[in-house]
Image (cartoon, grey):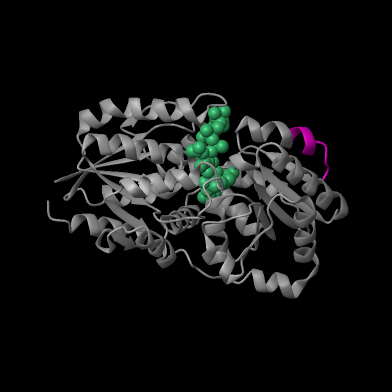
Amino acid sequence: MKKNLVIFGTRPEAIKMAPLVKAFFNSKEVFETKVCITAQHREMLDQVLSFFEIEPDYDLNLMKPDQNLYTLTADIITSLKPVLEDFKPDYVYVHGDTTTTMAASIASFYSGAKVCHIEAGLRTFNKWSPFPEEVNRSVTGRIADLHFSPTTTSKQNLLNENIDENQVFVTGNTVIDALNFSTEKVNSENYSDSEIENLKMLVQSGKKLILVTGHRRENHGQGFINMCEALKNIAESNPETQIIYPVHLNPNVQKPVYKLLNEIKNIHLIAPLSYPAFVWLMDKSYLIITDSGGVQEEAPSLGKPVLVMRDTTERPEAVEAGTVLLVGTNKEKIISETDKLLNNRELYNKMSLLHNPYGDGNACSKIVKTIANIKQ
Ligand code: UD1
Ligand code: UDP
């Protein structure tokens, strides 16, 4: 029996690890699997756990209001010691590029467990963008024993760093597994969701819906001010559009967004949505403006154009396919590219083609099979 410990801490990690946890639970004859959450996020993490019906075995409950990277990193490493010593996993699974990912990799390496990195090999090659994620995932890549890359591009990035090809597996991104799980559950008989019912009342038919999210640390401060000024301009010059913005709970996001956008008639600032409600809203939207990583991966599968408020992306596949356009946090650029998408049908149609560069929804079963086949 192989002992697995799956560690995560934030909303996107939870969404992308949930289908993997379920896949391991479905292989109980091969694996004993436990889940540890750092709770780097609290409310936004609990929303995901509740939808996917996952009860963690260990909850480190570390989130503090307006936390900083120094204490969060130290707290995660220190708090994981007793968990790793108690369960003694053979394999630890970490995801992506958050502080939880990087700190949990270091702690797991200290424990002697094999570290498996899910969503491995994404790179912008600019250590300040996204900050601190580019360095987090590079450190994790250096530590990991097994790398599960979503695409051949991300695999190649690892090979270029002299990682042994036998340790890298291209699986697709588990976010597509999560998206499929969510769609299936929402469409099942007896499923009811009050958040989706509320959204049905909020979304105005006949109006083009622009969905907005944002949270990146390098955009805090002037970046968010520019973004809010752009959204204000778009809303006021296009009264036939409706902007819905579920605002991330980070106080560095909440403060400028509520201060600058609260009073505008066709902008609706709402609390972060549960995963199925957010997927429902993405599907209803005309276009998405975001700096999120996960949303860039989900949108092509839903055929939605995305303007990404970043100067770099570690997800070039959707840019190459034409669904995603980088606009940075330049106010004029956000306004002009939104304008084009609202008014130029040909361009809109080109950017809203359905395609799946991030996988076929079977990433988790590929990961489970790979680990199951390893001889102890
Ligand atoms: C974190 C990750 C980022 C990831 C993002 C996903 C790091 C350094 N950053 O950024 O890579 O893309 O999550 O959303 O790992 N808060 C709450 N409730 C919550 C969540 C956050 O109140 O459920 C508030 C708290 O005041 C917290 C603050 O937001 O201290 C910042 O959270 P933190 O995880 O440090 O940064 P994020 O911006 O969420
Ligand atoms: N998401 C959600 N509710 C929201 C906004 C986003 O469930 O109100 C989901 C979204 O579908 C995606 C993930 O959260 O899967 C992205 O999280 P975030 O943007 O916070 O982090 P990133 O992907 O940038 O690390």
How many numbered marks appear? 0
Whether residue 241 sits left or right of residue 155 in the image: it is right
Q: Nearer the viewer, residue 324 or 1?
A: 324
- Above or below residue 293? Residue 265 is above
Stretch of the chain drawn in magenta: 258-266
Percent of width and height locating residue 300: 56, 64
Quick check: is 263 in the magenta stretch? yes
Percent of width and height locating residue 375: 12, 55
Look at 78% across and 50% down and name the residue there: 331
Q: Nearer the viewer, residue 240 or 203?
A: 240
- Above or below residue 271? Residue 292 is below
Quick check: is 132 in the magenta stretch? no
Q: Nearer the viewer, residue 189 or 319?
A: 319
Query: Residue 106 falls in which quadrant of the image?
Result: top left
Look at 63% across and 30% down and name the residue there: 251
Whether residue 43 sits left or right of residue 143 in the image: it is right
Query: Residue 88 falls in which quadrant of the image?
Result: top left
Query: Residue 13 falls in which quadrant of the image?
Result: top left
Percent of width and height locating residue 146: 28, 53
Is residue 299 at least partly visible in the picture? yes
Percent of width and height locating residue 231: 77, 48
Is residue 55 at least partly visible in the picture? no
Look at 48% across and 67% down and name the residue there: 357
